[in-house]
Amino acid sequence: MPADYHTHTPLCLHAEGTPEAFIDAAISAGVTEYGISDHAPQIPEPFDDWRMAVSDLPAYFEWIERAKKHAAGRIPIRAGLECDWLTGCEPWIAQLSSRYDWDYLIGSVHYLGDWDFDNPKWLGRWAESDVDAVWNHYWKTYTDMADSGIFDILGHPDLVKKFSHIPAGDLDRFYEPVIDAIAASGSVIELNTAGWHKPCSDAYPAPRFLELACSAGIGLVISSDAHSPNEVARDFHQAIEIAKTAGYRETTLFEKRQRRTEPLT
Ligand code: ZN
Ligand code: FE
Ligand code: FE
Ligand code: ZN
């Protein structure tokens, strides 16, 4: 069973569970490693209501220590952050990366300009948007994030489909340029199983994207994006099958921002 590197803590204000409960869930699921990657602080504060504050970082480090203590060598615990890709964010990400000896940083696109488009609060804004235009904006933003090269893992690649707003026709026209950028950057992508439990009922990314990514030599992690202990490693068996169908035979492991691979089983 691959590692599960994309998981949250209550510090982001929309997750629940103790470090002990998350670790117990990871051990019983049989994942290789467990990684904690809560929503990173973002300046200027207050930024939004779904992330930890800068002043929460010490509590986050304590959460990680508690997880390690509870794991007691039964499973490796890795430390990361899910950072938001925003225009001009590079100096802030550099500051965050110096605050701890991270194992990896995940970059995610949740914002297009001032719009956190995956927030159900703003479904009305989707209703009045041109889906093709939003997709163009999203993939341009995702490509910029890949080009930055500052993240180890690029999160939930086609999150833009969350509420099932999907343009007509062949989607390769969106996928191909971003696949090239990711391959050139050397970052890996995640197959994020949370999408199966969202209106789109499809993992992020779609199987076709995964197939193109594999052909381009892009590395892979499988992630649950758990916001509670019962979601740790959720649907990993199904995800492994989909990754294999796309051509993947291994997944990537991270320690202190260095990587190695393990066979996909
Ligand atoms: Zn979240
Ligand atoms: Fe996210
Ligand atoms: Fe997440
Ligand atoms: Zn996420």
Image: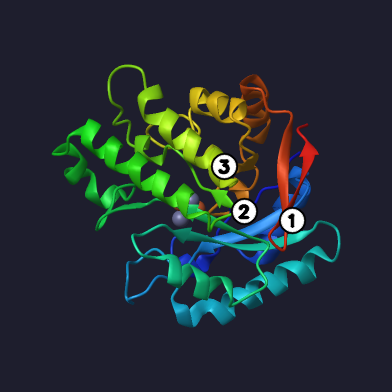
Residue beneath the point at 43% across and 76% down: 53
Q: Is residue 68 left or right of residue 231?
A: right
User: Extreme right residue here?
Assistant: 73
Q: Secondary structure at mark 3?
A: strand
Instruction: Determine contact: label 1, label 3, CB under 8 Å.
Output: no
Residue 138 percent coordinates (x, y)? 33, 42
Q: Amino acid at mark 3?
A: Ile
Judge by depth and name the residue closer to the eye, 248 or 33.
248
Residue identified by numbered label 3 = 189
Residue 59 percent coordinates (x, y)? 57, 79
Checking the image for residue 188, the label placed there is: none
Residue identified by numbered label 2 = 229
Q: Secondary structure at mark 1?
A: helix
Q: Quadrant of residue 158?
A: top left
Residue identified by numbered label 1 = 24
Cα–Cα gap, marks 2 and 3: 23 Å
Judge by depth and name the residue closer to the eye, 68 or 257.
257
Q: How many marks?
A: 3
Q: Amino acid at mark 2?
A: Pro
Residue beneath the point at 78% across and 51% down: 27
User: Extreme left residue here?
Assistant: 128
The tag earlier along the polypeptide, 2 or 3, is: 3
Q: Residues within 10 Å of mark 2 (few under 14, many from 20)?
A: many
Instruction: Determine contact: label 2, label 1, CB under 8 Å.
Output: yes
Residue beneath the point at 52% across and 48% down: 154
Q: Quadrant of the C terminus?
A: top right
Q: Amino acid at mark 1?
A: Asp
**Circle 2 or circle 3, nearest the eye:** 3
Q: Quadrant of residue 41?
A: bottom left
Residue 102 percent coordinates (x, y)? 65, 67
The tag earlier along the polypeptide, 1 or 3, is: 1
Q: Is residue 265 above or below residue 108?
A: above
